[in-house]
Image (spheres, grey):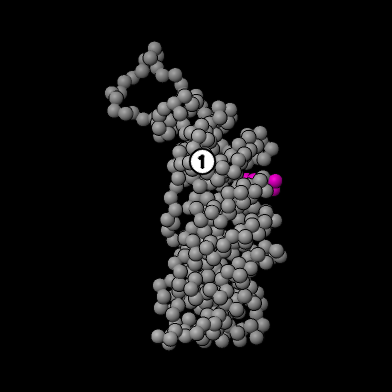
Amino acid sequence: MNDSWFRRSNGTSSGSSSIGTQELFGNGEQQLANNNLIPDSGSFFFNGTSSEDTFFPSDRGQKAFVASSEFAEPARTEITLQNVVGKEQLINFAMDRHGVKFLEIHYPTDANNDLHRAVFEKLTESMILFGGLCKNSNGNFIIQKLVEFATLDEQKVLLQRMVECGLADMCKDKFACRVVQIAVQKFDRSVVTDLIKALHSSDLVDICTDQTSIHAMQRIYAIKSSGIMEMYRDMIIDKCLLRNLLSMSQDKYASHVIEGAFIFAPPSLLTEMMTEIFDGYVKDHGTNRDALDILLFHQYGNYVVQQMITICTSALMGKEERRLSPSDLGMYVAWYEQLL
């Protein structure tokens, strides 16, 4: 695996922004947001103070004093996950930057645990709630926790919610994209296959050129598998990338996807991709430059060319995972000579 591809991609900034608590569900669900997600002064844990005061009380400039036994403050009650669930504060905690850390730490990983089931069922009970948490800067962390420790049946529920929320929209959201990425990593292969299948109904070119969703695409490319999942992965290259390699290689975000395609493409598709770059385009009439020459001197396209060179040199140095026949080696030699 070429680590430089991931390093360059991870360095890409994302322009998405988080959404506030009151705006979580949009205008149509404002009342639901007001009732369920905004901490109010009468709640059990959020008693009118900021979340920082609730979890990390501090001196606000008052003079210090030594409390006598008569005036000593009562001991603080220890907060437990059972308290949070029982007092219906789960959503408030999930939306709070300190509260969500508490939930992450105390979420039971044992699927037979009653609190595990209670938390999971509450956070996935509706598409609107689930989607809002996924797209929230704090809420997405507890959803990632649900994904990481989900049983096969729970994975299917989570996937159903993702599809209902719109997988493509989740991939393009700065925070929800993290949920999709960890789902690709942690879900059972049969469920991941269904995820990729659902994603195929979306505009793949749009996903491949988005600054955020490219990270989800990279996770899909990097899956080491065979069978139907590999078929869907190869379909992305065949239906979306081929015949668009020159333009997408010059795009700031799509160029990452093209690099990944060169790394993980099977031999047949790799041959088509190399052939397209070398001979698939008419030379520019004004400059008489071919596709390879254009990419060599392009700020993003040059990374794709570097990846092509790396693939050839790795094969010629015997670093390929598969055993290469003499004819295969001859093909890599021919590509390498064209690149030089």
Q: Which residues are magenta?
A: 148-153
- Per the image, the residue denoted by label 1 is 28
Image position, residue 80 (x, y; %) = 55, 30
Q: Quadrant of residue 333?
A: bottom right
Looking at the picture, does residue 123 appear above or below residue 89? below
Image position, residue 86 (x, y; %) = 58, 28
Q: Secondary structure at mark 1?
A: helix
Q: Quadrant of residue 68?
A: top left
In magenta segment, residue 8: no
Which is nearer the eye, 17 or 155?
17
Image position, residue 299 (x, y; %) = 40, 72
Looking at the picture, does residue 166 appear above or below residue 62? below
Residue lying at the far top in this picture: please name it.
70
Looking at the picture, does residue 147 appear above or below residue 105? below
Q: Residue at x 51, y 40 (%)?
A: 28
Q: Is residue 313 visible?
A: no
Image position, residue 166 (x, y; %) = 58, 52
Position of residue 227 in the picture relative to residue 97 (left or right): right
Q: Is residue 251 visible?
A: yes
Question: Could you classify mark 1 by the number of other residues whose Cα lies within 10 Å: few (under 14), some (14-19), or many (20 or more)?
Answer: few
Q: Residue at x 43, y 71 (%)?
A: 300
Q: Quadrant of the N terminus?
A: bottom right
Which is nearer the eye, 308 or 281?
281
Q: Residue at x 44, y 80 (%)?
A: 294
Q: What amino acid type is highlighted by mark number 1?
A: Gly
Q: Residue at x 41, y 27 (%)?
A: 48
